[in-house]
């Protein structure tokens, strides 16, 4: 091939790159020899792949791409062609915009080397832009002199203990993309680093997460729940994908059942009801948040305020009001940056509001561990009744390791038996992210500590602990001198059965 022919080919490639700069779908449809060679019998992207590429194209063409990062999370079953799509997006991003920077991450270098980048290598060898780039086991770099460091994609296995390896993810005024492969296992610490990169001004920002929905908690799960207002989300059922083995999938369904967690995660691409260590399942929490609120007469019952006091700088103090089965009518109150006396005043304020509503008996269950003693002292000094609760205190039920585990156990049974909570994603996330285990020897149930949750990259479950504090002290929740709305009037002096005993 002489120099003139090379010049003509290069000119055609440049023309194609410019035409497809804002159109990843057109790139995927035209940059590979569909129907020929190893792609014989294949016509182009699958339906779900086309949808993803169309969403990305429309976002860019709308002009939003320089003001708002494109965020897409895809939860899927196995065998849908995810790695193909990842390869096409990487190649499109690199081939159509000069000095593009990209990072692809997964839990291990082996995953990146043998799966993600092995698939990229396959499509790189089929791509019409192959002469422009150099592909290795873990990098894709531009061959143009002087651009190897500024026009590249790198595979970097994530490390929760070294999130700084992801620092420097910036590419001002150009294109930057980040792809999470097997996203379900990537911790919050890595997400937070990438969040910082998604703030560059006048930069085309793209953040994609792909994975099997194996965990009913964590940052990937949050994309579909707590943070769903910031993410475009998709669930892809393996049975709808052109590349999947339908016969084998059906055998799995027959073996495990359509509603089994195995089929939900591995085939249907939906999150399980709970992880194996999850104390409260998503289904229990969702049911409690959406069931119809029963008729309750607050003035005939005891109102219980549960107060979880902030321990760390990014934690919040939360107050929950529960009256019988109703922990919904009075939304939780949350505060940051208050000292102990100020928080005590906020608790007293709500106490007085409830008194003004005609509620005659109000309990305050306040977590005094850490810095909780200060608001408790303020309340007591100002003649407010307060029960000082220490999470580490001994449980009254031998099944539990400590009081915190016991009150969560009572709260779980309350939710299962008709309790109603706010339909609030912060609260639901807090409830469903706490894991549990058992002590060696005595086999006592123990909950994950807040400190350990932070090590997993999760926030302290302040909202959930506040709710559970309303179960810390067992008490008759119907006033003795009035019948409950569900029971006839009892003779004077008769004992009302403790519903949580």
Image: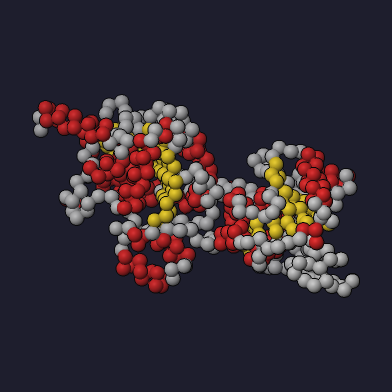
Report if residue 81 is visible in the image.
yes
Give the residue displayed 25% in from the left and 50% down from the top: 44
Which residue, as the protein is rendered here, is positioned at the far left?
A: 2
Question: Residue 195, position in %: x, y?
Answer: 50, 38
Please say which color scheme the image uses: secondary structure
Give the residue displayed 39% in from the left and 72% down from the top: 254
Report if residue 405 is visible in the image.
no
Is 320 located above or below residue 281 in the figure? above
Q: Which of 364 and 453 is in front in this view?
A: 364
Q: Is residue 104 left or right of residue 355?
A: left
Q: In which quarter of the image is the C terminus?
A: bottom right
Give the residue displayed 16% in from the left and 50% down from the top: 36
Q: Quadrant of the N terminus?
A: top left
Question: Residue 147, position in %: x, y?
Answer: 31, 28
Which residue, as the protein is rendered here, is positioned at the far top?
A: 146
Q: Nearer the viewer, residue 408 or 57?
A: 57
Q: In this view, does 400 lie to the left or right of 28?
A: right
Q: Quadrant of residue 407?
A: bottom right
Question: Residue 464, position in %: x, y?
Answer: 66, 53
Q: Quadrant of residue 416?
A: bottom right
Q: In this view, does 25 lie to the left or right of 464?
A: left
Question: Residue 393, position in %: x, y?
Answer: 76, 58
Give the residue displayed 35% in from the left and 48% down from the top: 51
Q: Which of 55 and 125 is in front in this view?
A: 55
So how many labels did they put on this image? 0
């Amino acid at each position: 091939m002489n120099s003139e022919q090379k010049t003509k080919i290069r000119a055609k490639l440049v023309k194609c790159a410019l035409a497809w700069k804002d159109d990843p779908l057109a790139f995927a449809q035209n940059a590979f020899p569909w129907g020929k060679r190893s792609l014989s019998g294949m016509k182009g992207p699958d339906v779900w792949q086309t949808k993803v590429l169309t969403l990305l194209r429309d976002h860019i063409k709308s002009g939003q791409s320089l003001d708002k990062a494109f965020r897409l999370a895809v939860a899927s079953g196995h065998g849908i062609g995810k790695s193909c799509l990842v390869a096409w997006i990487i190649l499109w991003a690199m081939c159509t915009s000069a000095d593009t920077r990209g990072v692809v991450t997964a839990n291990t270098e082996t995953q990146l080397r043998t799966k993600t980048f092995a698939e990229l290598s396959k499509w790189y060898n089929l791509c019409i832009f192959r002469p422009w780039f150099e592909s290795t086991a873990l990098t894709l770099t531009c061959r143009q002199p002087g651009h190897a460091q500024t026009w590249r994609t790198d595979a970097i296995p994530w490390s929760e203990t070294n999130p700084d390896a992801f620092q420097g993810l910036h590419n001002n005024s150009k294109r930057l993309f980040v792809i999470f492969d097997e996203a379900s296992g990537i911790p919050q610490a890595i997400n937070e680093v990438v969040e910082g990169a998604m703030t560059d001004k006048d930069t085309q920002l793209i953040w994609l997460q792909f994975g099997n929905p194996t965990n009913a908690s964590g940052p990937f799960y949050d994309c579909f729940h707590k943070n769903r207002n910031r993410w475009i989300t998709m669930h892809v059922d393996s049975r709808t994908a052109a590349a999947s083995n339908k016969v084998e999938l059906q055998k799995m369904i027959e073996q495990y059942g359509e509603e089994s967690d195995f089929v939900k995660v591995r085939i249907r691409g939906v999150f399980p009801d709970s992880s194996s260590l999850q104390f409260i399942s998503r289904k229990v929490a969702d049911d409690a948040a959406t069931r119809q609120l029963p008729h309750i007469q607050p003035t005939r019952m005891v109102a219980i305020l549960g107060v979880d006091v902030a321990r760390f700088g990014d934690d919040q103090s939360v107050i929950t009001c529960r009256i019988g089965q109703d922990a919904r009518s009075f939304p939780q109150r949350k505060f940051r940056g208050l000292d102990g006396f100020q928080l005590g005043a906020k608790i007293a304020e709500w106490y007085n509001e409830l008194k003004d509503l005609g509620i005659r008996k109000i309990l305050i269950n306040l977590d005094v561990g850490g810095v909780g003693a200060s608001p408790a002292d303020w309340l007591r000094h100002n003649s407010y009744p307060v029960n000082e609760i220490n999470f580490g205190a001994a449980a009254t039920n031998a099944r539990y390791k400590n009081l915190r585990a016991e009150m969560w156990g009572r709260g779980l049974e309350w939710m299962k038996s008709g309790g109603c909570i706010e339909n609030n994603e912060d609260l639901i996330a807090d409830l469903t992210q706490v894991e549990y285990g058992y002590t060696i020897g005595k086999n006592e149930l123990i909950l994950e500590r807040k400190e350990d949750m932070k090590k997993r990259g999760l926030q302290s479950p302040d909202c959930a602990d506040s709710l559970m504090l309303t179960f810390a002290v067992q008490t008759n929740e119907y006033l003795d001198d009035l019948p409950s709305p569900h029971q006839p009037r009892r003779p004077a002096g008769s004992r009302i059965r403790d519903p949580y005993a």
